[in-house]
Every structure is written in structure tokens, then in C-alpha cells.
Amino acid sequence: IMLKDPNPNSPTKNESIFMPVTVIECPPLKTYSIRLYQNSDNGLQLITEILSPKLDKELSRKINLPKKQKERNIESLLSKCVEVRICFYTQPKSIKLKKKPEIFEMGLSTKDIKQQYEFAKNLLDKEIRIHEIFKQGQFIDIHAVTKGKGLQGAVKRFGVTLKSHKSEKKRRSAGNLGSWTPKKVSFRIPQKGQMGYHTRTEFNKLIVDIGTSPEKINPKDGFPHYGLVQADYILIKGSIPGPQKRLIRFAEAFRNHKSIPIDINYISVESKQR
């Protein structure tokens, strides 16, 4: 995209600059349940779970749905409760991505238990859209799972230099495994193992734009390995972890609470196919 440089300390301040962005499609979330927790010797313990009365049938692909809900005395349960959380589920079927939804849990920022419960109760049976939570120019943290690369050796995982061609036995490994004593191999020694498919958090990612009309950003022949965006979308400055079509979770920035004005001049919709 092309936009006015928002950095006041930049030599190109207020000039039109190029910025690479990542397009993330954000179909609305739905509330699955409200969870009440109490303290126990082993940390937080679930007291009860209040399900939404209207759940999509696609959820049965992910979990076993109960046929009936038990009647509960909410007032007595709230007196024991120390934290209220909400479970959400995605709607990938609405954008024809896949049929099985993803379920995840989120905490609430307010400390008063009754306020937490009332807020969560109001979200039951409602769809939550991206522009109701975040705004353009805001900084967020992104939680994602990186691309999986399987079992890899020390050279690819840690950048170990290849040993001499005359080295004994192995060439693509560390020179030694550490000292004789203690008689164990430290975790600091580069060895083969799993590479990729790790949960990672990236801090302070800038929201360049939030939109509800995909025709503004859709290339003529779709995005590579994805297709056309059909729902609400968000543009993030730079890259993010993981491949296409994998779940990404957003959170308000933990380290950075400021926001900056964004003025977009041009969004390229030329073909991204190579």
C-alpha cells in the first residue's frame, strides 16, 4: 500500500511511502459459553459453564454438544466465583474456508465479578465483529502458530557451521556435546529436533486499516494459496507468523497503548500470483 508516513521523527514525514501489509480475513465470532472459576489448591477450578442457547451445528464436528442444560442458582455460584471468562468459536464456514470451527477462551478486563458476568451474558447470542473491538492506527499483539518444518538438524535449526570434510563421523553437527562432568548433555548444545509449529507472540503490530468491503483489497485473481476475501478484514503492517488459513488471535498491546493516525493513498489490487 501507499500511505502518508505517520512517524513524526522520520525524514519522510507526511510524504507518501510504500508499506508492505498482511491481509487477515476476520469473519464474526460467536459466543459459545460463559465459564465461572473459583480458587482451589491446584489453581483456578471450573465451577460451571453456561452455554449459549443458539449454537451452530458445525460445533458438533469439534466437540460433543450436551442435549440439555441443567438449571443453576447463578447468585450462589457468583459468590464463590473469582473470575469469569468467555468462550468464543469461529465461523470458517461463512467464508467457505473449512467446516470445523475453532474454540478459544478469553478473560475480561474488569475486576468486579457481577460486572464481568453481566457483560458476558449480554454477549450470548451475539456476533462480535473486528471493528467493534479494534480501531485503525492501534497497536496489537498477535498470537499465532509458526510454519512447521518437522525434524531438522543443528545446521538448519541453529546455524552451526559445517565441520571440515575430514571430520570424523558427522559433518552437520556440533563439535562436541559439552564437558565430561557433569555427565549430561546441556539443553544449550545445538542438536536435531522439532523446528517450527510453535506458538509465538509478536508485540506491537500496527493496524493499518480495518474494512468491511473486501472488493477494495481483493486482487483480480485472489491471494496465492487462499483465494478471495469475503468477510471483514484487517491490514497489519509487515508480516505475521504462520501459513495461510491458520487461526490467529489478537490482543490489545501489552507494551504499547498509543495509536497513530493513518492516511492511506493507494492499495494495490494487482495480481499476486507468481
Image: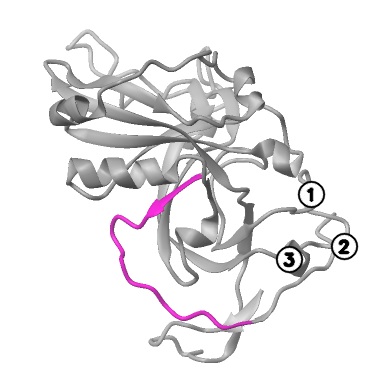
Q: Position of residue 20 (x, y in %)?
A: 62, 67
Q: Amino acid at mark 2?
A: Lys
Q: Considering the image in quadrants, where does the C terminus appear?
A: bottom right
Which is more toward the observer, 227 or 77? 77
Residue 259 appears anywhere in the view: yes
**Rendered image: mark on residue 28:** none
Looking at numbered disc 3 in the image, what kind of residue is underneath it? Ile
Residue at the spot 48% in from the left edge and 20% down from the top edge: 193
Is disc 2 in contact with disc 1, using a CB cutoff of under 8 Å?
Answer: no
Q: Quadrant of the N terminus?
A: bottom right
Q: Which residue is mark 2?
A: 220
Query: Which label's residue is closer to the chain start, 1 or 3?
Result: 3
User: Residue 224, which numbered label?
Assistant: 1
Label 3 Cα crowd, 10 Å radius (few <14 / some 14-19 / many 20+): some
In this view, the residue in front, 165 or 1, is 1
Helix or strand or loop: what does disc 2 sit on?
Answer: loop
Magenta stretch bounds: 249-264
User: Which label number is shown at residue 217?
Assistant: 3
Q: 139 or 55, which lies in front?
A: 55
| Residue type at the position of mark 1 | Pro
Q: Is 75 a magenta residue?
A: no
